[in-house]
Amino acid sequence: MALREIITPDNPVLRKKAHKVTSFADPKLQKLIDDMIETLGKAEGVGLAAPQVAAPLRLIVVRLPDDDASREEYGDQAGVLYVVINPEIIRASDELVEGLEACLSIPGYYGNVERHVGVTVRGYDRKGKQIRIKAQDWLARVFQHEIDHLDGVLFIDKAKEIYKVSRREEDDDQPVQAAEVKVELNPNE
Ligand code: CO
């Protein structure tokens, strides 16, 4: 296993539509999955999509934290590793909920995004077996965020407000304009 570099919006792969995986037995795919799991763990994130490590494939890994607080709140879902290839949301609750999101590809920012409370995700595991996952609440949010990455969509596209993480306490939670954030995220401007 090896760590992969997590790309930011200055790399165009992050904005491209990812390709479907067609060969599950490909050793390169299996290596990519192992590397993504390791990279996600090191970054202490809850989800990572292949385009975030510059691999334009429809593949995500998701794992909620496994600490006591997470186990209490999320029960069986805490700490479970989900590797989903060619994931699709086949059902989504009518009910929507707003919640805070961040992204390993957009360090230093977070925002409130409206998502479906529950989703059913269909896809394939790393051996090519079809799987179906019913996710609620935070897990459902993470799946929606990660699956968006496969179409080049980032949470900053959907966030109602975007906040900049600040070390200075008086600046905490200061909303910044979305346009301003996009400019700051683009090193070419
Ligand atoms: Co993300």
Image: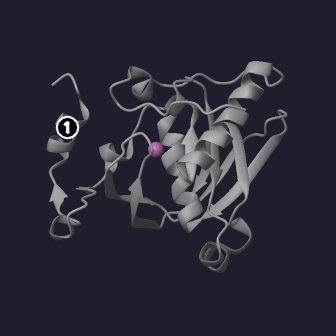
Name above or below for residue 55 compared with residue 123: above
State which quarter of the image contains the C terminus: top left
Q: How many marks?
A: 1
Q: Is ligand 1 within 8 Å of the beta carbon of the residue shown at mark 1?
A: no
Judge from the rendering whether residue 158 lies leftward or rightward of residue 56; answer left or right. Answer: left
- What residue is at 43 percent from the left and 28 percent from the top? 14
- What residue is at 36 percent from the left and 45 percent from the top? 107
Name above or below for residue 22 compared with residue 64: above
Query: On the image, which quarter does residue 34 sit in?
Result: top right
Residue 79, x across and y down, in percent: 70, 62
Residue 121, x across and y down, in percent: 66, 49
Residue 59, x across and y down, in percent: 64, 34
Name above or below for residue 172 compared with residue 188: below
What coloring was used for the rendering? one colour
Q: Badge 1, how many Cα within 10 Å: few under 14, some, many 20+? A: few
Q: Is residue 118 visible?
A: no
- What residue is at 23 percent from the left and 27 percent from the top? 187
Judge from the rendering whether residue 67 lies leftward or rightward of residue 181; answer left or right. Answer: right
Question: Which residue carries the number 1 mark?
Answer: 184
Q: Is residue 135 visible?
A: yes
Q: Amino acid at mark 1?
A: Glu
Residue 110, x across and y down, in percent: 33, 55
- What residue is at 65 percent from the left and 77 percent from the top? 68
Judge from the rendering whether residue 89 lies leftward or rightward of residue 189; answer left or right. Answer: right
Residue farthest to the bottom?
Answer: 72
Q: Label 1's element? A: helix
Closest to the observer: 20 or 146?
146
